Image (cartoon, rainbow, N blue to C red):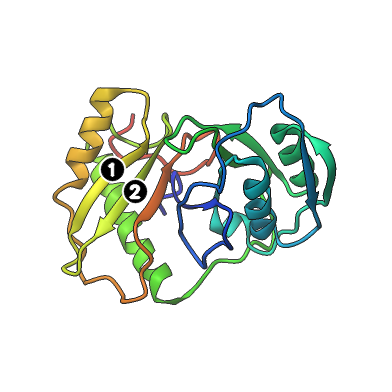
Amino acid sequence: MCVCIAWISTAKAAAAGTDVQSADPATRASPESQMLDFDVPAQPLAAALAQYAAVSGRSVMFIDEWVAGRTSAPVRGRYTPHAALRALLAGAGFTADDVDTQLSGAFILKRVAAAPGVASAGGSQRGYDALVQARVWDALCADLRTAPGHYRAILQLQVAASGRIGQASLVSSSGDPGRDAAMLAALAPLKMDRPPPADLALPLTLAILPHDVLPGPRCATVH
């Protein structure tokens, strides 16, 4: 299982989609010191994060399976964006890390402990997601420079009707321009064994996370 690579969604002003989505919040990122009025009731965590993004102007990226079945804490009153997010996540088993992306002032959720009872989505898209994830894992593991586990990056992928990766782009750099270029070069020739389902939501967004954020097996190329 390619545990260091995960599909992510991004909380935004509109209602969250059913699987992988990425969009800016409705407003520009607020200065961290600015006090804002929040009135976010306890509700499914993905919906609460979308409401938070609409008020704060801060995008929140998360792994779908982690938040499925989880409930937010209510947040009412005046808070800075970071303090409001901490309050919203209270008791949910997550912390929020800043991540340098094209989505200004974005956070990515980090699980602080294994969360029991987290549901996995089903359906044709989830099966195709797993296929793409496995092919991306193999491609990145083929080169020590790009092997997942010791860096963080966020990729967006377009999949053509033929199953070929039509375009791969970095939403968030790995911090090394040489590795960034090697990652995109590794993904360029990829083609899936079958075409994507008609309901596949594009682009696909993948988080490449270090082992301290998302523990898992290592590539065979890593010694």
Q: Is residue 209 above or below residue 179?
A: below
Name the residue carrying label 1: 169
- Disc 1 is placed on an element classified as strand
At mark 2, the secondary structure is: strand
* Count of number-bearing discs: 2
Residue at the front extreme of this rendering: 27
Residue 24, image x, y percentages:
49, 47
Circles 1 and 2 in contact, beta carbons < 8 Å? yes
Amino acid type, callout 2: Gln
- The answer to whether residue 135 is seen in the rendering is yes
For disc 2, the neighbor class at 10 Å (few under 14, some 14 to 19, many from 20) is some
| Residue 106 vs residue 206, the one in the foreground | 106
- In this rendering, the answer to whether 172 lies above or below 66 is above
With 7 as the anchor, is 15 left or right in this view? right
Mark-to-mark CA distance, 1 and 2: 5 Å
Which amino acid lies under the numbered mark 1 shown in the image of this protein?
A: Ser
Disc on res. 128: none
Q: What residue do we see at 52% from left, 41% from top?
A: 215
| Residue under numbered circle 2 | 156
In percent of width and height, residue 49 lies at: 65, 51
Whichever of callouts 1 and 2 sits on the residue coming sooner in the sequence is 2
Asked if residue 37 is positioned above or below residue 34 in the image, the reply reads below
Side of 7 relative to 157 (left or right): right
